[in-house]
């Protein structure tokens, strides 16, 4: 890469890092091409980019971004997973892939500028994902009106039972007085 290409690459990477909600630093040494392609494909499936970047260029690109909070870990060959949306799904994918591939190691991560070590990322995986949280909120929101309708139905049913009982009682009274 010549100087012009490097400057363009750094500017593009900085723009990506500025938009990123979270980044995860991964050690990929020892993975074959097939494994790296699987990592890229699985991460792409959850809306996450996977880049192998020279550390010097990554340090330059991360200046002034939240990813700069983990720049001291940009040592040796490493790759960066960048997510713009769901924070938990890429962490789940990386943890699952690190179990499949012993050579894939999660080094570090950051969410909104807060560094996360490997243990924190593994705890993050235990949280429900974005779609799961949305479905939980929607089911809770739906439960309130449903319960309200049930209560109203119960009140109306009790009123009808009371009116029917009054009708029966009046019918009995009128039949007694007629005799």
Image (cartoon, helix red, strand yellow):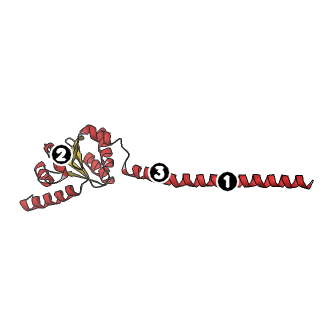
Residue 28 position (above or below residue 85): above
Disc 1 element: helix
Q: Earlier in the sequence, mark 1 or mark 2?
A: 2
Assign a secondary structure to mark 2.
loop
Q: Disc 3 to disc 1, how far (Cα)?
A: 26 Å
Q: Quickly name the residue at label 1.
A: 157
Please give the label number shown on residue 127. none
Note whether residue 110 is visible.
yes
Residue 101 shows up from this direction: no
- Determine whether 114 is above or below 164 in the image: above
Please report whichever mark, 3 or 1, sits nearer to the chain's N-terminal start. 3
Considering only order in the chain, which callout, 2 or 3, is on the residue closer to the N terminus?
Answer: 2
Estimate how packed mark 2 is, as few (under 14), some (14 to 19) or many (20 or more) residues with alpha carbons within 10 Å: many
Q: Position of residue 67 (x, y in %)?
A: 19, 50
- Provide residue 136's location: percent of width, then percent of height: 44, 49
Which residue is denoted by mark 3 in the rendering? 140
Q: Mark 2 = which residue?
A: 78
The residues tagged by marks 3 and 2 sit, at their Cα atoms, a distance apart of 42 Å
Q: Looking at the image, which is closer to me, 162 or 100?
A: 162
Quadrant housing residue 152:
bottom right
Question: In front: 142, or 21?
Answer: 142
Decide: few, some or many residues near mark 1? Use Cα within 10 Å; few <14, some 14-19, many ≥20: few
Whole-angstrom CA distance, mark 1 to mark 2, is: 68 Å
Is 93 situated left or right of 76 in this image?
right
Mark 1 touches mark 2? (CB < 8 Å): no
Label 3 residue SS: helix
């Amino acid at each position: 890469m010549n100087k012009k290409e490097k400057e363009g690459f750094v500017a593009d990477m900085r723009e990506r890092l500025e938009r990123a909600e979270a980044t995860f630093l991964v050690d990929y040494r020892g993975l074959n091409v097939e494994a790296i392609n699987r990592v890229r494909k699985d991460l792409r499936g959850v809306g996450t980019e996977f880049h192998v970047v020279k550390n010097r260029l990554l340090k330059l690109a991360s200046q002034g971004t939240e990813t700069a909070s983990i720049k001291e870990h940009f040592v040796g060959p490493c790759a960066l997973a960048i997510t713009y949306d769901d924070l938990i799904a890429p962490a789940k994918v990386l943890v699952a892939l690190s179990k499949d591939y012993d050579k894939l190691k999660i080094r570090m991560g950051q969410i909104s500028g807060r560094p996360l070590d490997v243990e924190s990322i593994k705890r993050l995986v235990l949280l429900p994902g974005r779609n799961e949280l949305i479905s939980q909120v929607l089911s809770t929101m739906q439960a309130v009106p449903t319960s309200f309708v049930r209560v109203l139905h119960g009140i109306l049913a009790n009123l009808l039972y009371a009116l029917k009982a009054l009708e029966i009682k009046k019918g009995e009274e009128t039949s007694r007085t007629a005799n």
